[in-house]
Image: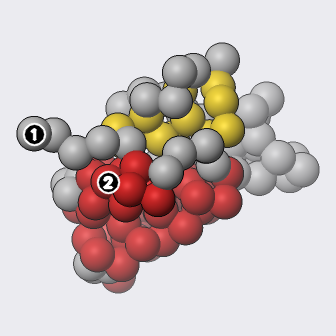
Amino acid sequence: MAWSWSHTAEAYAAAYANCCELPLETLQVIAAEWEAVRPDESDADFEGFSHRVYESALARIKREELSADLLADLVWEQASEQATCDNGGWAAWLCPFGCGCHSVQFDRAA
């Protein structure tokens, strides 16, 4: 189960900062996942995900050597538009499907 975001400005700032600290490789994967969401296309699976587009997008993102800062901004923009988090509101989904490994907390580690 998932919830819609309903947090304070401080919580969003903390989640964004946590997003910016993710490894480059993780940000590359998440950015490619966003490009691969194609729910109305014939090459998409039952969740609207195109593995062909994902592989192509990931290769292009790596080839273009996009910076972690740019990728974090792109990922955060997509995640903010989706505005979905775990049940309980603890972790913001950064990827389209809330897989757990692509989420960040709404607070900063002490």
Observer able to see residue 68 = yes
Instruction: Choose top left, top right, bottom left or bottom right for residue 19.
Output: bottom left
Tell me whether the residue at label 1 lies in contact with that at label 2, contact meaning CB atoms closer than 8 angstroms: no
Q: Judge by depth and name the residue closer to the eye, 97 or 83.
A: 83
Amino acid type, label 1: Ala
- Please give the name of the residue rendered at 36% of the width and 67% of the height, measured from the top-left corner: 72
Q: Judge by depth and name the residue closer to the eye, 18 or 61.
A: 18
- Please give the name of the residue rendered at 43% of the width and 29% of the height, measured from the top-left corner: 90
Q: Up-down: is 60 above or below 26?
A: below
- Please give the name of the residue rendered at 76% of the width and 41% of the height, measured from the top-left corner: 48
Query: Where does label 1 land, which residue?
Result: 110
Amino acid type, label 2: Ala
Question: Under tag 2, what secondary structure?
Answer: helix
Residue 53's spot in the image, x, y percent? 62, 57
Question: Under tag 1, what secondary structure?
Answer: loop
Observer able to see residue 28 = no
